[in-house]
Amino acid sequence: MSTIKSVTVKHANRSIWGHLAEREKSLPLVTPLDIYPEFQETRGSWFWDSGMALIEIETNDGVVGRGWCEDGCDIIGSLIHAHLRHLLVGQDAAEIEGLWDRLFRASLPYGRKGVALHAISAIDIALWDIAGQMAGKPVYALLGGPVRKEIPVYASALHPVGHEKVATEAKDYVAQGYKAMKMRFPFGPGAGMKGMKANEAHIANVREAVGDDIEIMADAYMGWDFLYAKKMVRMLEPYRLAWLEEAFLPDDLNSYAKLRQETDIPISGGEHAYTRFGFQEIIEKQAMDILQPDLRRCGGFTEGRKIAALAAAAGLPVIPHAYGITHIHFAMSTVNCPMIEYFPMPIWDTLPDTEIAPIFHDEPQPEDGIVRMKGKAGMGIKVNQNIFS
């Protein structure tokens, strides 16, 4: 038996989403706070500092598994040290399902969603890393084996920074080999009809730039309400969007379900949904056409597999939120995961100084719009310990 000897938490002032998190604080886009004039301009006016937690679980035979999650408020360490580690130390590291269930049940008074699930997700990723190392196989092999040799990725950027810049950026992604790309809406209800026209113009500009053979999508980042969205989809239908993402607050599933009845545009969401219970509710309400879990939030690989199974039974695809080695392993082993998200650097922008050093070494990067795995044991990457403390 491989027994858990210790659980350590380290912190870095970096985002697991990569450079986008810092850049997006100063880029225009609609957000959930759009209804308040003082917070309309950028996400940086209200968003927390970038931060991530690295969880290291060591076994009695010297194997160290690593997992991670977002931690902008630097509270994951306190949560794990004060509570969750007591349910791990001394336990068999191979009991991944049982450990997940005990962590979830023990954290119910303050958990079920949010930061508690972030912590459980990181722990789960670390346990799967241990399992892969012990077996000498990549995590995707333990999740059922590869269902594809390569994974398509879509370019996720295209903030509304001016039509000429955006058109140049979109054309550059086509030249790089991307077959799909996602943009951000600039406005929500607070900007009225003028904002709606600007939203349409942004979509029209990208469609004109890339032509009819490239899939385009758009993200409203929880910034709309139903009546606004009902009007917007009428304006957007001629541009043949592959999906409209996160139009409403994540718990407003009635609005999602109603919007699906109003338009032929596929409706997506789920990056702020938690556990199989949250996604089961989405499915039962017929609220979305595409599910977008983030395994570093929703419960790790253990819960991600269950979410994918629920989606498959309902005939729905899962397209994870944000890039990373976690979602590469997931996509490699999940039949109904057709692609994953990637945040390329726009041709008009540069990398922030704080993002020069990589978080991970050996993380596969897309080429020609696809990413491939090398089959290394466990998660298959090395953590840059220099950025953690």
Image (cartoon, grey):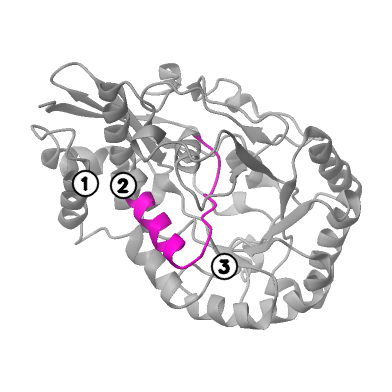
Residue 191 in the image: above or below residue 354 = below
Q: Amino acid at mark 3?
A: Asp
Q: Which mark is residue 127?
A: none
Q: Residue at x 52, y 69 (%)?
A: 249
Any part of residue 143 in sight: yes
**Toward the viewer: 374 or 159?**
374
For the residues labelled 2 and 1, the Cα–Cα distance comes to 7 Å
Residue bounds of the magenta highlight: 303-324
Residue 309 within the magenta-colored segment of the rendering: yes
Q: Position of residue 322 (x, y in %)?
A: 55, 44
Dot 2 and dot 1 residues touching (CB under 8 Å): yes
Question: For mark 3, what is the residue?
Answer: 289
Q: Position of residue 330 (x, y in %)?
A: 45, 42
User: In the rendered image, which quarter contains the N terminus?
Assistant: top left
**Toward the viewer: 357 or 45?**
357
Tell me if mark 1 has few (under 14), some (14-19) or many (20+) residues whose alpha carbon lies within 10 angstroms of its own: few
Q: Amino acid at mark 2?
A: Thr
Q: Position of residue 230 (x, y in %)?
A: 69, 81
Which sits earlier in the primary sequence, circle 3 or circle 1? Answer: 1
Dot 3 and dot 1 residues touching (CB under 8 Å): no
Question: For mark 1, what is the residue?
Answer: 97
Residue 270 within the magenta-colored segment of the rendering: no
